[in-house]
Image (tube, grey):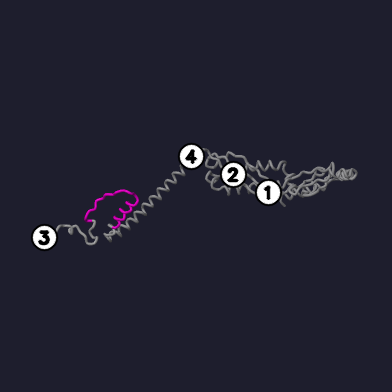
Amino acid sequence: ASPEKQDKENLVGNSKRLGICGWILFLLSFLLMIITFPVSIWMCLKIIKEYERAVVFRLGRIQADKAKGPGLILVLPCIDVFVKVDLRTITCNIPPQEILTRDSVTTQVDGVVYYRIHSAVSAVANVNDVHQATFLLAQTTLRNVLGTQTLSQILAGREEIAHSIQTLLDDATELWGIRVARVEIKDVRIPVQLQRSMAAEAEATREARARVLAAEGEMNASKSLKSASMVLAESPIALQLRYLQTLTTVATEKNSTIVFPLPMNILEGIGGVSYDNHKKVPNRD
């Protein structure tokens, strides 16, 4: 059997052993309630809300293995004392903890823990202040887990770290009747100098990547130009048309007058025009 079940069995066993004096006090208390009826009924009947449970102690012993409620419960005068336990989910805010990571970087990390009480008897009988104990345990677990991680692992693996913290907390608080629902790491603060160093490193990485991309682009462009030059070399007139097209584009983009020399040998091959055709032919008269 688990330790929690053993504790419950011990509590139930002790509660049933009231002894002779205990039964006498029980009968006297019950008789007092009957004699003072109906005034005593307002003192003995207690209302437990839907999200609450009541752990009743009779002569210092837990009355049953299960908490009472919700609804009306009967508390005998003089011998019964009850403790209300809230079963709603509780938010535990962990303040910033100064942590030295595995790579010797000082950081401040804060988080939040969501938990609820699933066993009111264990929460009352096994620990003095269950909420304070859970709060301190969450602080200690957060420091211990993050102290074994590097800064890059903390920044990149928050979900995995939060899940491991939740598992450790849930195992430790099981005997307290606590069930941890969720753990979240809210913020990781690093020194300003380290932030500047990381920003400079990231900028240098981006610049190196940009240079590599530019070099790859130049290489691809040179290959394309090489292929284009091979195509133009096969047809000399294509080069001349490309030259005229470039001049047209420049004239269209900027409204200005462009003066450029036009050697006559450029027109060679266009319509059979050559430099020799422009020489004067002597008269035969």
Say which label, 4 or 3, has the lower sequence index. 4
> Residue 50, which numbered label?
none
Say which label, 2 or 3, has the lower sequence index. 2
Q: What stretch is highlighted in magenta?
A: 241-265
Q: At numbered mark 4, what does the secondary structure look like: helix, strand or loop?
A: helix
Residue at 21% of width from left, 60% of height from top? 273
Real-space CA distance between mark 4 and mark 3, rounded to the nearest whole angstrom: 88 Å
Q: Which amino acid does label 3 sit on?
A: Asn
Residue at 36% of width from left, 54% of height from top? 221
Real-space CA distance between mark 2 and mark 1, rounded to the nearest whole angstrom: 21 Å
Residue to which mark 3 is pinned: 283
Foreground disc of the pair 4, 3? 3
Real-space CA distance between mark 2 and mark 3, rounded to the nearest whole angstrom: 102 Å
**Relative horizontal placement of residue 213, taking residue 120 as reference (left or right):** left
Residue 274 shows in this picture: yes
Q: In which quarter of the image is the C terminus?
A: bottom left
Q: At numbered mark 3, what does the secondary structure look like: helix, strand or loop?
A: loop
**Quarter where residue 237 is shown:** bottom left
Label 2: how many Cα within 10 Å (few below 14, some 14–19, many 20+): few
Foreground disc of the pair 4, 1? 4
Say which label, 3 or 1, has the lower sequence index. 1
Residue to which mark 2 is pinned: 186
Q: Which amino acid does label 1 sit on?
A: Arg
**Quarter where residue 224 is shown:** bottom left
Say which label, 2 or 4, has the lower sequence index. 2
Say which label, 2 or 1, has the lower sequence index. 1
